[in-house]
Image (spheres, rainbow, N blue to C red):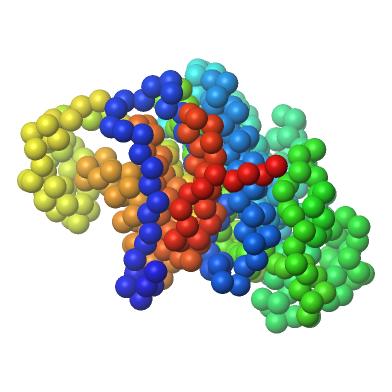
Amino acid sequence: MNFSEKKSVTLATRSGDGVHDDNNIVLVIHGGAGTMSKETSTPAQRRAYKVALSNALKAGYAVLHDGGEAMDAAVAAVSVMEDNPLFNAGKGAVFNTAGKNELEASVMLSKSPSSHPAIPESRRGAALTLLTRTRNPSKLARTIYLHPELVDHAFISGSTAEKIGERLGEELVDPSYFFTEQRWREHRRGLGLPEEPIPNPTNGDYSESRRSADLIDLRDPEHQSNGVRTAVPSCVSNKNSGYPDLPLDSFPTGTVGAVALDVRGCIAAVTSTGGRTNKLPGRIGDTPLMGAGFWAEEWEHNGGDLRRSGQWMLLPSWLREMWDRFHGQSSDATREKTGKSAVGVSGTGDGDYFIRQSTASTLARRMQLAGESVEEASKQVVQDLFSDGGIGGVIALDNRGNVAMPLNCPGMYRGVVRADGIPKVAIFDDDVLEEIDND
């Protein structure tokens, strides 16, 4: 890839142009995007990530295959990654400048889940930030969304969200749970501070002592998480430093996310993150901001001219010009298109740029108002990020099962599984999606 030409790569898979049916369940995931290098990575590292992605896909697919809700499938996939220290979410969350972990998560649906018909369509989703004790932020976001009688807000933070979650059965942990040696070393190195001695995570200020037995050791292939092996094989030790090879994405800014399409045609997007390495305390990223780092929506095609609607003058001039250009050249069949469309989006990368550009909702608007496909719209918003200096990527899924996974950087952990139940994953920008044998 020639980054000076500001290109992005799109890996897309299509299910055809037909309407959604029971055999069209789809789950697409990402585990973060960044500056990982194929040349400096080891086969063991690459396999660790691919197996972890495959396990997340299998967890979400099991829900979809049994006729479950898209939201539950997406949460199942994301929670597997939250429990794996390879990813910047949950257990593997990065530290802020104060040496603390502040987590974020969100969930959004294209329409209300059929299992909870009382939830109004207008609720749309729930977003959380500044969490310090929630083991699985994605599960808490789901729980908050399902209880509008307790939280009627779209966005809530900190101890209030966690206390409500605890009342509803969500697991809270001591903040030391989120301590991992690799993220701590990144934190200290990024601030120009000594990496050693490694602190005892049970000491709240992380200021003294050597490594404790509680720390995750990526050299241990038997590391368990919720009774499920996290598939971190033995890595080649870094002989110069005396500790295992770091994760591929040192100093990550990314997230983990999943977008699922269920048998009822509902799309759900779930995203979770530890944020940016050495972010300022209290910094809020794009993961909990609707329209920036995540989005899900369903809309009706009216088959008419948008110019005749009340929305026309509310659109920015560039979008009106694009509409005129597209519809001036399109066929009558395209202009008179009717029916419903839907899309779900989860982003990863430098969240500040996603916020400034409202990346996720802009993708949906390009599809709705400019008539672009999910692949076209996804590729364009990722290119726009790069034009302003933002690196990252998105995963997007429409209600016909079309998937897009564009990125503008060296790599993005990603994968997809369809009705056949075969997970396919990739890491680097030039990788082809492949099935992984994780026996």
Q: Quadrant of residue 22?
A: top left
Q: Residue at x 41, y 63 (%)?
A: 408
Residue 353 picture location, percent across and down: 44, 63
Question: Looking at the image, is 134 positioned above or below residue 268?
Answer: below
Q: Nearer the viewer, residue 37 or 170?
A: 37
Question: Looking at the image, is 264 positioned above or below residue 86?
Answer: above
Q: Is residue 182 left or right of residue 427?
A: right
Q: Residue at x 8, y 34 (%)?
A: 332
Question: Looking at the image, is 187 positioned above or below residue 176?
Answer: below
Q: Residue at x 52, y 53 (%)?
A: 426
Q: Residue at x 85, y 70 (%)?
A: 198
Q: How many marks?
A: 0
Q: Nearer the viewer, residue 335 or 40?
A: 40
Q: Quadrant of residue 331?
A: top left
Residue 417 picture location, percent across and down: 51, 37
Query: Which quarter of the figure is the C terminus placed in?
Result: top right
Query: Which quarter of the figure is the N terminus placed in?
Result: bottom left
Q: Is residue 266 left or right of residue 328?
A: right
Question: Looking at the image, is 19 positioned above or below residue 3?
Answer: above
Q: Nearer the viewer, residue 229 or 349?
A: 229
Residue 197 picture location, percent across and down: 87, 75
Q: Is residue 104 visible?
A: no
Q: Is residue 364 visible?
A: yes
Residue 267 picture location, percent across and down: 45, 32
